[in-house]
Image: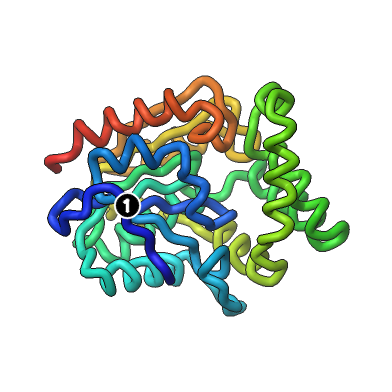
Amino acid sequence: MQLDILGLQDPDAPTLVLASGLGGVAGFWQPQLAALAARYRVVLYDQRGTGRSSDQLPEDYSMAMMAAELADALAQHNILRFSLVGHALGGLIGLQLALDFPTRIQRIVVINGWLALHPHTQRCFEARQALLLNSGVAAFVRAQPLFLYPAEWMAQHQARMAQEDHHHVAHFQGQHNLMRRLQALMHADFRAQAEAITQPVLVMASQDDLLVPWSCSATLARALPAATEERMAWGGHAMSVTDAENFNALLLQWLDQTDDV
């Protein structure tokens, strides 16, 4: 797994690992890089089976495997203490790291994540699976923004939507890998172990998220011993893209408050 290390290059600088969602690729974090790289050593990576980390994923692929792969890749770069900012699946990787590698991870930001899969989110995932299996990659990709962005934002960014569709079809992670990653995500359940995650956690949600109801973040925050909840009124599932200025300000504020933890 290839890591990109940006921002401060001092090995003793505070390190932020950015973990994307189901898409898996580092490019998701472009709207945050300038703000974060000015203050932190920032680590980006394409998750196994996506982007530059091409690989055939095993049938039993799991969240624990995702966490172990990231921990190993970081250790190879002598990064043994870090914080993680994760979007949806990426945030759940952070929670899994806290359980499996508790001395390595300092704090976690979970963006539009959950304690256990919500029935509404399951319905959305099942609809997306059906599109991929029955209608193909192009149909799956074309429907994807509906779950990520608010309708008015998409209407104002039609050229961008078309470019993203073309890019995602051309660089699709493959049906096998997507299904393995999605199954691992759908089976992630932290209800029995949440109390063991004692690191500071910022739980961020968007009230108009179509894919993951904001109440999932509230439930997660209540289950964690040291959680702070932050809710944005608008932005959809990918509010770090659609309302990056507000998102970045809220993220940096919490990071500043917890830098000495």
Question: Relative to 123, does residue 82 appear above or below in the rendering?
Answer: below
The residue that appears at 76% across and 44% down in the rendered structure is: 143
Image quadrant for the C terminus? top left
Q: How many marks?
A: 1
Q: Residues within 10 Å of mark 1 (few under 14, many from 20)?
A: some
Task: Give 195 or 153, whichever is nearer the viewer.
Answer: 153
Task: Give 166 or 252, whichever is nearer the viewer.
Answer: 166
The residue that appears at 32% across and 40% down in the rendered structure is: 36
Residue 56's image quarter? bottom right
Residue 50: image x %, image y %? 57, 65
Residue 259: image x %, image y %? 17, 39
Residue farthest toward the right in the current orientation of the protein: 135
Amino acid identity at mark 1:
Leu
Question: Relative to 124, does residue 3 appear above or below in the rendering?
Answer: below
Q: Left or right: where does residue 127 sit relative to residue 4?
A: right
Task: Give 35 or 24, whichever is nearer the viewer.
Answer: 35
Colour theme: rainbow
Residue 110: image x %, image y %? 41, 43
Task: Give 10 or 100, whichever is nearer the viewer.
Answer: 10
Image quadrant for the N terminus? bottom left
Residue 180: image x %, image y %? 62, 68
Question: Relative to 130, does residue 209 appear above or below in the rendering?
Answer: above
The residue that appears at 34% across and 71% down in the rendered structure is: 73
Q: Secondary structure at mark 1?
A: strand
The residue that appears at 43% across and 53% down in the rendered structure is: 19
Q: In this figure, which residue is indicated by the disc labeled 1?
A: 6
Residue 226's image quarter? top left
Question: Relative to 78, does residue 260 appear above or below in the rendering?
Answer: above
